């Protein structure tokens, strides 16, 4: 069964949107878990108690907000797909941070596992970005903010 251009584009965007939704929900749920179930989370994954709950809960809030940001391109993935590049960048930074700081934790193996999954999400998001780009046959160097022809003509 062959798809027409618009049907194939919609199908590609469905999978891209689903993956981006799952990555965003992962961060939101992890953030909420860290914030509201801090002691349980630390005892389960790090086998330790928390001395200063402030910074741990702050990381939960940060993850929650990052997850909301990850979901934002879903408002209009066709025009906002370039924001996926920022999500990919955040996953790269997370992997570097986790690997370079794992030795400072009581359970570095859990941190390395988290880095692996963040890296995996980043790799899958690269595929999502490429799919979105192909689905819409956009120019080689798209801008981060979407523009339309009418706006460009007004400026010129």
Image (cartoon, rainbow, N blue to C red):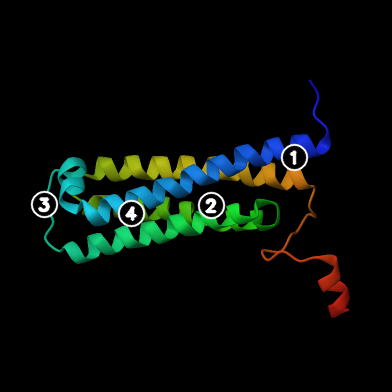
Q: Which residue is drawn at the image coordinates 33% and 39% (left, top)?
A: 113
**In the depicted structure, whether residue 108 falls above or below residue 69:** above
**In the depicted structure, whether residue 47 falls above or below residue 151:** above
Q: CA distance from mark 3 to mark 1?
A: 49 Å
Position of 152 compared to 72: left or right? right
Sequence-wise, the earlier of marks 2 and 3 is 3
Which residue corresponds to mark 3? Answer: 49
Q: Residue furthest top?
A: 1
SS state under label 2: helix
Tell me, yes or no, whether the two marked residues, 1 and 4, touch with CB atoms within 8 Å.
Answer: no
Q: Residue furthest bottom?
A: 155
SS state under label 3: loop
Q: Which one is in front in this view, the residue at disc 2 or the one at disc 4?
A: 4
x, y percent for residue 122:
51, 46
Sequence-wise, the earlier of marks 2 and 4 is 4
Position of 31 compared to 105: left or right? right
Which residue corresponds to mark 1? Answer: 9
Which residue corresponds to mark 4? Answer: 31
Q: Which one is in front in this view, the residue at disc 1 or the one at disc 2?
A: 1
Depth check, front residue: 94 or 43 = 43
**Disc 1 residue crowd, few under 14, some 14–19, many 20+, Cα 10 Å:** some
Q: Residue 154 occupies which quadrant of the picture?
A: bottom right
Sequence-wise, the earlier of marks 1 and 2 is 1
Q: Which mark is residue 88?
A: 2
Q: CA distance from mark 3 to mark 4?
A: 18 Å
SS state under label 1: helix
């Amino acid at each position: 069964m062959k798809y027409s251009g618009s049907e194939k584009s919609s199908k590609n965007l469905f999978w891209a949107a689903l993956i981006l939704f799952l990555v965003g929900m992962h961060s939101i749920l992890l953030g909420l878990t860290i914030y509201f179930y801090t002691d349980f989370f630390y005892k389960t994954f790090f086998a330790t108690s928390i001395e200063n709950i402030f910074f741990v809960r702050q990381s939960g809030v940060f993850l929650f907000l990052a997850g909301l940001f990850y979901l934002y391109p879903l408002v209009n993935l066709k025009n906002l797909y370039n924001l996926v590049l920022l999500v990919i960048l955040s996953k790269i930074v997370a992997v570097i941070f986790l690997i370079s700081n794992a030795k400072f934790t009581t359970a570095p193996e859990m941190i390395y596992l988290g880095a692996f999954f963040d890296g995996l999400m980043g790799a899958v998001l690269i595929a999502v970005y490429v799919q979105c780009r192909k689905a819409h046959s956009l120019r080689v160097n798209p801008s981060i903010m979407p523009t339309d022809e009418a706006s460009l003509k007004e400026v010129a």
